[in-house]
């Protein structure tokens, strides 16, 4: 069962953190405008806030995909995971979109200008359309399952629609980058597929980590059905997801390092950074080994560690991908170096913390309000 | 209907930056944020070093990737003249067009000032525009990205739409040496001291720009992107030439 006093404490900390970070961000944005971010017209247009936004959004869609698949194909034993994944998806979505709203030049204008433009040639237009559909279906699904108990008949239909919407958002997010043929670092036909697998992996990692977090990192405190899922099927699926994502990362890095195409020289730089090696070895290979080991796979500590490492690895991957694709400037001559340098500003870091606090506040509120751990006991 | 284009003769360009300066004055550019720029490149190692320069406006492409990615249609291709323009009333500042431009010719108006002190603090705006320069041109058309830019939008070279669009209909070339046409010539073309720049109608087979492109083997930058710029570069007129593409066939 959930420890109410601990969840209250987490909620209060999240709210205080949210207020402090949001105040700092808003103060800096009001006083400095977009100059509070470390972007530049030399070539770094999409910076840390976009990394945070995409990470949260695609984690949200990953969680929604996991929940949908369990709703469609799973049984009653999946109940405690499904409802938690759905609510985490809501929390992640709100966290991510709030960051995007603070990054855009005209966020309010975007609300009407994008849907009414019918800019069908724009991947971003399709992404927004799918996000709108995703939000609607996600909220419907959450509403259908908000009360503990048997799943209503409509939940399965809703889950199918949610799966399609989540796949759409994630795939199109990949198209947004993958279609940029003028940027070889981003451009590839496999990017939308890679995004989908990355998203699924993120969803699994978050589902595992937050399931443990809700039960004080102890399997003894879990209901039997949840414990069965976490010690049975889920770690094996998690291992497979890590492996598939690792293949995408490895293939992209190898081809990037091998190829001479302009823009891919970023790979020589990335391969020399500690962040990339943390992403690869600590964030993917180590968790994969943990999940492949029969003795460790079912262990609460190793599962929590693997999930946490994967969450961090995916964030680094998102950062390296989005920033890396812009490090070679487009025709700036001597006004720009061969490779741009970038580090997030204080405001950009605060945006990340703001998103984390906001998502956690929403998650803990839902945990308390909807009894996400409820499941039908066998 | 005209399809305006520019030809830049690299054999004549001296890299003097008169075009950059004229553009900055004509369009009230922020210091260091040059819609039109001459880029300098150094190549080789001492003592065999060469400095090269490359004049680069916005190319007002025939198939502009910036237009196709814009989620609000704020960036658009003007059918009357082939200009690529930005409607500042629709732009949401998502910067996707900047990301998608293969030539790096777009600018987000709210980035940190390139040159310090920030001139926007010296001449603060009285309305929602970026700044209020003491001398500014009379042209102001936010729906075409002309005038003092607002906050939170993307801006770029307009091919001096405010001048070119007023040119008499049917004119093949806008040449600063023709007295009755000089007021319609883009700023960068008009001031080019070695006369390395030519501006005319690419759809008019009689235009001088078309003649130059044909006779002197005009090439376009990064043809492989399929953007098909309306700015051509001349670099020598020998029979042997570097092809821009493996295939001249358009993607159907």
Image (cartoon, coloured by chain):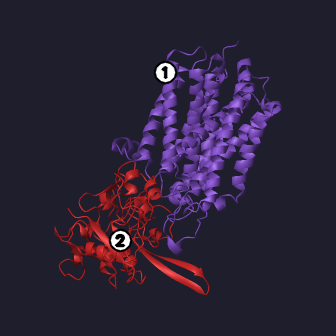
Query: Tag 1: Cα neighbours inside 10 Å, few (<14), some, or many (≥20)?
Result: some
B12 left or right of A152 in image: left
Tell which tag, 2 or 1, sits nearer the viewer: 2
The label number, if any, that marks residue A157 in the structure image = 1
Residue B98 at what x, y percent from top left?
Answer: 45, 58
Above or below A358: residue A370: above
Query: Tag 2: Cα neighbours inside 10 Å, few (<14), some, or many (≥20)?
Result: many
**Quadrant of residue A216 within the rendered picture:** top right
Q: Does the residue at mark 2 contact the one at mark 1 (Cβ under 8 Å)?
A: no
Depth order, front residue of A87/A314: A314
Q: Which residue is mark 2?
A: B232
Residue ID at (81%, 33%): A296
Above or below A215: residue B134: below
- Image quarter where the N terminus of chain A lies is top right
Residue ID at (54%, 70%): A336
Residue A186 at what x, y percent from top left?
Answer: 54, 53
User: According to the colouring, which chain is red?
Assistant: B
């Amino acid at each position: 069962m959930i420890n109410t006093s601990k969840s209250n404490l987490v909620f209060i900390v999240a709210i205080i953190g949210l207020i402090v970070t949001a105040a700092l961000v808003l103060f800096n944005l009001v006083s400095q405008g977009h100059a509070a971010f470390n972007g530049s017209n030399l070539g770094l247009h999409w910076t840390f806030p976009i990394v945070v936004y995409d990470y949260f959004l695609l984690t949200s869609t990953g969680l929604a995909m996991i929940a949908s698949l369990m709703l469609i194909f799973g049984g009653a034993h999946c109940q405690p995971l499904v409802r938690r994944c759905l609510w985490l998806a809501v929390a992640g979505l709100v966290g991510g979109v709030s960051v995007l709203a603070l990054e855009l030049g005209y966020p309010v204008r975007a609300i009407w200008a994008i849907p009414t433009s019918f800019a069908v040639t724009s991947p971003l237009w399709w992404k927004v359309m799918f996000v709108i559909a995703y939000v609607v279906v996600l909220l419907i699904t959450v509403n259908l399952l908000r009360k503990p108990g048997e799943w209503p008949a409509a939940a399965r239909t809703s889950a199918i629609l949610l799966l399609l919407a989540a796949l759409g958002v994630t795939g199109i997010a990949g198209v947004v980058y993958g279609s940029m043929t003028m940027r070889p670092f981003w451009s590839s036909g496999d990017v939308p597929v890679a995004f989908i697998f990355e998203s699924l992996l993120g969803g699994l990692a978050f589902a595992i980590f937050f399931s443990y977090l809700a039960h004080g990192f102890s399997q003894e405190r879990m209901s039997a059905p949840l414990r069965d899922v976490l010690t049975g099927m889920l770690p094996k699926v998690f291992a497979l997801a890590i492996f598939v994502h690792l293949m995408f990362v490895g293939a992209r890095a190898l081809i990037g390092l091998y190829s001479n195409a302009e823009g891919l020289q970023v790979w020589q730089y990335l391969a020399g950074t500690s962040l990339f090696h943390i992403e690869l070895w600590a964030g993917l290979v180590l968790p994969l080994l943990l999940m492949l080991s029969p003795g460790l796979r079912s262990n609460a500590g190793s599962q929590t560690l693997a999930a946490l490492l994967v969450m961090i690895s995916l964030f680094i991957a998102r950062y390296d991908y989005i920033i890396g694709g812009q490090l070679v400037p487009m025709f700036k001559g001597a006004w720009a170096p061969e490779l741009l340098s970038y580090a997030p500003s204080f405001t950009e870091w605060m945006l990340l913390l703001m998103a984390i606090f906001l998502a956690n506040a929403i998650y803990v509120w839902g945990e308390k309000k909807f009894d996400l751990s409820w499941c039908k006991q066998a | 209907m005209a399809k305006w284009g520019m030809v830049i003769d690299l054999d004549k360009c001296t890299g003097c930056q008169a075009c950059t300066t004229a553009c900055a004055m004509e369009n009230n550019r922020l210091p260091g944020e040059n819609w039109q720029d001459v880029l300098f490149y150094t190549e080789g190692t001492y003592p065999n070093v060469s400095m090269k320069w490359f004049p680069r406006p916005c190319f007002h492409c025939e198939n502009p990737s910036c237009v196709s990615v814009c989620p609000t249609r704020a960036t658009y291709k003007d059918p009357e003249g082939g200009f690529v323009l930005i409607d500042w009333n629709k732009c949401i500042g998502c910067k996707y067009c900047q990301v998608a431009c293969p030539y790096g010719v777009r600018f987000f108006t709210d980035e940190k000032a390139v040159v310090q002190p920030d001139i926007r603090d010296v001449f603060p705006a009285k309305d929602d525009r970026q700044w209020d320069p003491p001398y500014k041109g009379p042209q102001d058309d936010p729906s075409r990205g002309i005038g003092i830019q607002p906050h939170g939008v993307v801006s770029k070279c307009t091919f001096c739409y405010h001048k070119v669009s007023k040119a008499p209909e049917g004119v093949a070339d806008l040449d600063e040496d023709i007295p009755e046409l000089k007021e319609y010539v883009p700023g960068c073309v008009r001031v080019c001291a070695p006369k390395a720049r030519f501006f005319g109608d690419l759809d008019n087979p009689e235009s001088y720009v078309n003649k130059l492109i044909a006779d002197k083997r005009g090439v376009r930058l990064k043809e492989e992107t399929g953007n098909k710029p309306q700015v051509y570069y001349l670099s020598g007129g020998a029979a042997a030439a570097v092809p821009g593409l493996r295939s001249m066939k358009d993607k159907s």
